Image: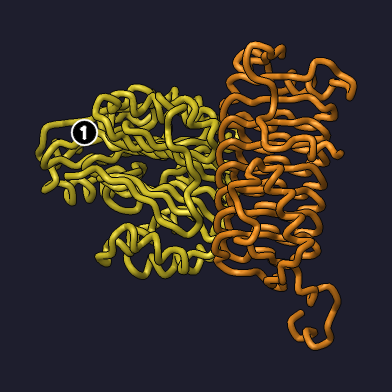
Amino acid sequence: MCGIVGLFIKSAHLRPELGGMLAAMTSTLCSRGPDSAGFAVYTAEIPGLVKLTLTSDVAGFDAGTLGDALSRAIGVTRSVVSRHTHAVVTVPADRLTHARKWLADHAAHIRVVSEGVGLEIYKDVGYPDDVARAFEIGDIEGTHGIAHTRMATESAVTTNGAHPFSTGRDQCLVHNGSLSNHASLRRELVRDGVAIETQNDSEVAAGYLTRELRRGRTLGQSLESSLSDLDGFFTFVVGTRTGFGVLRDPIACKPAVIAETIDYVGFASEYRSLTCLPGIARARVFEPKPATPYFWEHQG
Amino acid sequence: MSENNSWVGRAVGVGGAQRSGTDIDLDEVSVRELNATLQALQPETNRSIWRVLNPAGRHALAVGMGAPANVELEGNVGYFCGGMNKQARISIEGNAGQGVGENMMSGLIHVRGDASQCAGATGRGGLLLIEGNAGARCGISMKGIDIVVKGEIGHLSAFMAQTGRLVVFGDAGDALGDSLYEARLYVRGKVESLGADCVEKEMRDEHRAELFTLIEKAGEAHAVDVSEFRRYGSARSLYNFHIDNAGAY
């Protein structure tokens, strides 16, 4: 099972509603994945700054204290926003390497969930509605986002194993399905320098796209080649800084439905998840074709 | 005259001021209550017109009916709508999710929009009429149902289809009729590829007559020409074990 969701806002007036719309869409898919949930949102960018979404293996870590220590160490003004078990630390792009090294050296319990100019990721174990409430996803404003409700098959039910997975800056992926060649592909990706942290098959798909993008391929080309390089069944929704894409395997056994209006493009595992969107009755509703990459991007 | 033949190219249900039906609003009534109500209808019922409001993509609507009532679903529906239907005429004023009319026995299901994958799967009788497109695996393992799709159908349609007729006004995706038994497939558009053991067959008069009847039931008798269709069926070469194929097992 698993439920996946994507939302791409076209009309600026809906940006304040991004988190609320994503949470409402995801809520309908709780039954498809009651184990864990996660939300990736692309929020306002500030030129020259990069966001690190952090969480800790230690319960109840104090993001404020950590942020103080980090900003002193790298010599910048502290910028930390906490959300439930996660915190977003914003650092100047030219201090990013320094910041990540300091975290690795001085805060071994901290895990970097995502790094991005726009991207923030919030994910945890628990019933999706509870996860969304705990992170106050409904308050988040942004341009686009993806989300996932998990019924675990390939790895343990942990925060780490929850989707979305991010293996590259401003890149993220959610997956419904299961990959059978993830072990060999993981070894290959690790050899190629892609950081993969879990035994989860979906993280390998995210890592695969990261590698292909690093090699200078476009997202469309990377999705296209994943059709022959990934063995298994899948519907993917991937997020990048400028937009989101959808891909189904050639057999297309995992469900997918898209609704597009002048204001947004919504993706969900099931149509009922889209019924909460404004103007849905007038939306163009269709199923993405198998083995065909779809992509929507913000211009500029 | 069979039940299907009595419905020739007119809308399901009764419209206008004369209608006297019962509205069920799914924002107020549960799917379980709706289905229990519809399933309790007796064949001789005089409460024959039901309108279901706010289906909102909910699953398993109007399943397991056994009476010749009319059910109009006013919007998009989720999975398995009208599954196992006997006798009822179900109209979906929107798109249908996976498995619409799955294992239906008789009656009519009319989808005004598109249908997702596995439309009419394992259906044993009746007519499934889809105004738009149908997704992958349309008519998979069909066993006597008639399916008419006015748009396109997706890949692996009529997989292991046993009996019944599948009529497609548009194109068909990859591997049409793979491992087909005795179902008859009529496609007007392009077929992306034929599945194993599915071949094009000669269109004889009896096939043209059969196709015309189905087009007529779909309300398109004077709009769609039978001569534009091609017929596909089983080459019957997979029916029995061939010693020459032993190496493949």
Q: Position of residue B69 (x, y in %)?
A: 79, 24
Instruction: Give the color scheme: rainbow, by chain, secondary structure or one colour.
Output: by chain
- Residue depicted at x 31% and y 34%: A9
* Residue nearest the observer in this picture, A151 or A222: A222
Residue named by callout 1: A44
Q: Position of residue B241 (x, y in %)?
A: 85, 79
Q: Position of residue A107 (x, y in %)?
A: 30, 43
Q: Where B57 sits versus B141, above or below?
A: above
Q: Split into 4 quadrants, where in the image is the C terminus of chain B?
A: bottom right
Check the image and name the residue furthest to the front.
Answer: B222
Chain in yellow?
A
Q: Split into 4 quadrants, where in the image is the N terminus of chain B?
A: top right
Colour representing chain B: orange
* Residue nearest the observer in this picture, A53 or B75: B75
Quadrant assignment, res B79: top right
- Residue depicted at x 32% and y 64%: A212
Q: Position of residue A37 (x, y in %)?
A: 48, 36
Q: Where A177 sits versus B126, above or below?
A: below
Residue A287 appears in the rendering: yes
Q: How many marks?
A: 1
The type of residue carrying mark 1 is Ala
Q: Is B30 left or right of A172, judged from the image as shown?
A: right
Residue A180 appears in the rendering: no
* Residue nearest the observer in this picture, A31 or B166: B166
- Per the image, label 1 sits on a secondary structure element best described as loop
- Residue depicted at x 50% and y 26%: A129
* Residue nearest the observer in this picture, B197 or B214: B214
